């Protein structure tokens, strides 16, 4: 996997209160492409951050229907990956990728 394709798989870190609590148990949450597989996510994380990934869990959140100023619209589907890192490895998601 080249560096460009690794950046294509991992879109952005998820920085929320819940993901900050997960970082205490050595887990990091990333927003990923919807068609990305677990092995692709694992390889991209290991290549970009030079860490050992133990497991990858994925969540696909379906887009909600919203009304804004009388116009109906639909949010996009979002796929998130929860990555468990090996003991001693760490990723600081508050800095840029």
Image: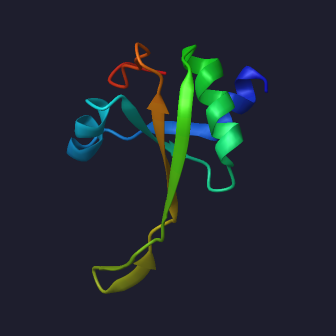
Along the horizontal axis of the image, is 46 left or right of 94?
right
In the rendered view, does 46 fall on the left or right side of 26?
right
Determine if residue 21 is in view: yes
Q: Is residue 11 above or below residue 59?
A: above
Indicate how the structure is coloured in the image: rainbow
Quadrant of the image for the N terminus? top right
Residue 27 in the image: x percent, y percent?
38, 34
- Occupied quadrant, residue 25: top left
Q: Residue at x 69, y 55 (%)?
A: 35
Q: Where does the image place residue 7, in percent across and percent down from the top left?
A: 64, 30
Residue at point 40%, 75% (across, down): 64
Residue 53 vs residue 71, the one in the foreground: 53
Image location of residue 30, percent across then percent down: 46, 40
Above or below, comparing residue 83 to residue 90 in the picture: below
Judge by depth and name the residue closer to the eye, 6 or 56.
56
What's the residue at 60%, 20% (across, down)? 48
| Closest to the observer, 7 or 81 | 81
Q: Nearer the viewer, residue 43 or 70?
A: 43
- Residue 3: quadrant of the picture: top right
Question: Does residue 7 show up?
Answer: no
Against 15, is 1 above or below? above
Outermost residue, right side:
1
């Amino acid at each position: 996997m080249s560096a460009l394709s690794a950046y294509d798989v991992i879109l952005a870190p998820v920085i929320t209160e819940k993901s900050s609590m997960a970082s205490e148990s050595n887990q990091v949450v990333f927003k990923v492409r919807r068609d990305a597989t677990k092995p692709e996510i694992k390889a991209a994380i290991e290549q970009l951050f030079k860490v050992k990934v133990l497991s990858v869990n994925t969540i696909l959140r379906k887009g909600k229907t919203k009304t804004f100023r009388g116009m109906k619209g639909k949010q996009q589907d979002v796929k998130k990956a929860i990555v468990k890192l090996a003991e001693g490895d760490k990723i600081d998601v508050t800095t840029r990728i």
